[in-house]
Amino acid sequence: MKKSIIAGMLVLVSGCFVACDDVFEPVVENNLPIDFLEQNSSYAENLLGVAYTYLANSTGYAMNEPATDDAVSNDAGNSWRQIAEGRWTSSNNPANRWENCRSGIQYCNLFLANVERVTWAKDEEANKLFHDRFIGEAYGLRAFHMFLLLQAHAGKDNAGELLGIPLVTEPEGEGSDFNLPRNTLKECLAAMNSDIEMALKYLPEEYGSSYFENLRDRYPGVSAGNLERVFGEKFKGRMCGRILEGVKARASLMAASPAFEGSGVTWEQAAEDNAKVLSHVGGVEGLDPTGAAWYSDSAIENYASGQCPPEVMWRSELVNNNDLEKEHFPPTLYGSGRMNPTQNLVDAFPMANGYPISDSNSGYNESDPYAGRDPRLSLYILCNGMKAGHENTVIYTAADGTTNDGLGKISTSTRTGYYMKKLLNQNVSCNSASQVNRKHYTARMRYTEFFLNYAEAANEAWGPMGTGTSGYSAYDVIKEIRHRAGVGLENDDAYLESIKGDKDAMRALIRNERRLELCFEGFRFFDLRRWKSELNETAKGVSIENGVFNVINVESRNFRDYMIYCPIPNSEVLKYSNLKQNAGW
């Protein structure tokens, strides 16, 4: 982190500074002193704009599955593939968030230290509302950056102490002491939760007139015009109460997990924090029936600013392109086929009757392995003989196939016999002669994630059928998710019924459902670590020749035990003697 951000402060051009963080694209205009914010509120506002920009850099799809058992990449230079093969160091860490998120915190600190000097509007009432909202955003952004840092860098030092990051709540300048020790994880979580509570005092649950009633209680006599001016629909996508409840819920689940035992967070607390998020959709009955395919909703093309489907709590701005498809479509659809799902992941999808394929009751046929499977398999993964693209092209991934989509045919062909289908819009064309773009967005928070968070925590806290104070159980959640997916419909999900009294079996099922529902969204890399799971499972694929399916080893993994925790950047540890590295790095 640079020793002084203040000295080289930039004025940023951010347009109207509305809606989501993606509008913040810093452009150097001039170097001005911090005192300039007394004359120009946009200058102060842009301090938060930078913090949003750093946040945006860390909340897109990480595409880190090639560092898990769910996928490999056909790109030899892919950084996640490199770390999976054992070339992960504290100087070469694609999971690093240290500099960006600590810079984001610095900008929040700088804003909070100077906010009282700013006049936001000539109208006294509007000025008060803007003042409060921006303070709430600053605390909320600081909390979110803290979570991202803890997820990526919290860990145990050589003495076995569970550490977070150095807590810094004041702007750092020329005379600051940068040689600070890391605070404990417990202290960092307390600071994050304190920031969230402070932010919730100032922010609306969500932006828009539907949420003005609570704001009127907070600001008696406030005019409808000023509520719309400060808290209207056009600000959807910025820090609000729901997003911050989601941050707290994510952090609680992480901290309650085996890798972070000793954090002070219990499974009961994690369950309650996630239930609070789900209360906004009415609990388990609020699971969106179409949520499994949220990314393929044709209505995306006509979304208003900040508009989300019922499944999505927070999203990025819309972009109109075919970038994802160019990266991940198979070669015959003019893509680079980069993300290759593994046989390991394919085998994790149960049969449509709900039984794992390894169960004798499943009816699984090794000679016809994709028949009768969980419908999510064909929704998320492109297997041999399935159709894709706007012309419903049949994709042949077999080793003896006649197209470049076949196993190992060219550098952009699949290495596993599979291509990723999830997240991709099948109406896109990547053919340069007839290119078709479609609107896309990143779902930064989906309610399904929090249902799965709750199920995991509730099972650990109270067992499969226990409900805590929310009134629904881990069993209830998993039954609803599987029902939505089309699993177990014909037999009342007999497999789930058979294990609903077994906490260990339910844990395995919940983790598997999480693997399926959240695949390719960046969760499994951190899930495996917080669970202290086996990281060295060989990535497998399938070679199909003459109609015969043979499982093959594709890529060995080379993770050591200490890689449960990600490193602090080596450059930072070398600079600051009080900054302890996580053990092993």
Image (cartoon, rainbow, N blue to C red):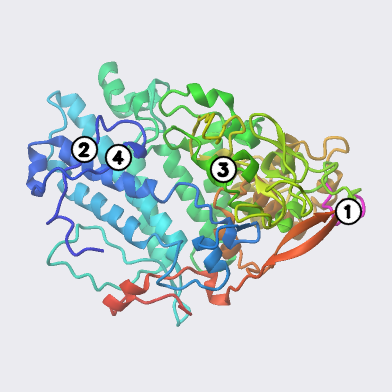
Q: Amino acid at mark 4?
A: Phe
Q: Which residue is mark 2?
A: 13
In the picture of the structure, the residue carrying the numbered disc 1 is 366
Density class for disc 4 (Cα within 10 Å; few <14, some 14-19, many ≥20) is many
From mark 1 to mark 2, how far is it between C-alphas? 59 Å
Tell me the element at label 2: loop
Q: Which mark is residue 275?
A: 3
* Residue picked out by circle 4: 24
Instruction: Indicate whether 559 appears above or below 356.
Output: below
Image spot of residue 183 (x, y percent): 35, 69
Q: Position of residue 309 (x, y in %)?
A: 54, 28
- The label shown at residue 319 is none
Image location (x, y in percent) of residue 112: 21, 48
Identify the residue shown where x is 57% and y is 76%. Answer: 560
Mark toward the viewer: 4 or 3? 4
Local packing at callout 3 (Cα closer than 10 Å; few below 14, some 14-19, many 20+) is: many
Q: Above or below — where is 551 with respect to 341?
A: below
Can the viewer see residue 489? Answer: yes
Lower position in the chain sequence, tag 1 or tag 2: 2
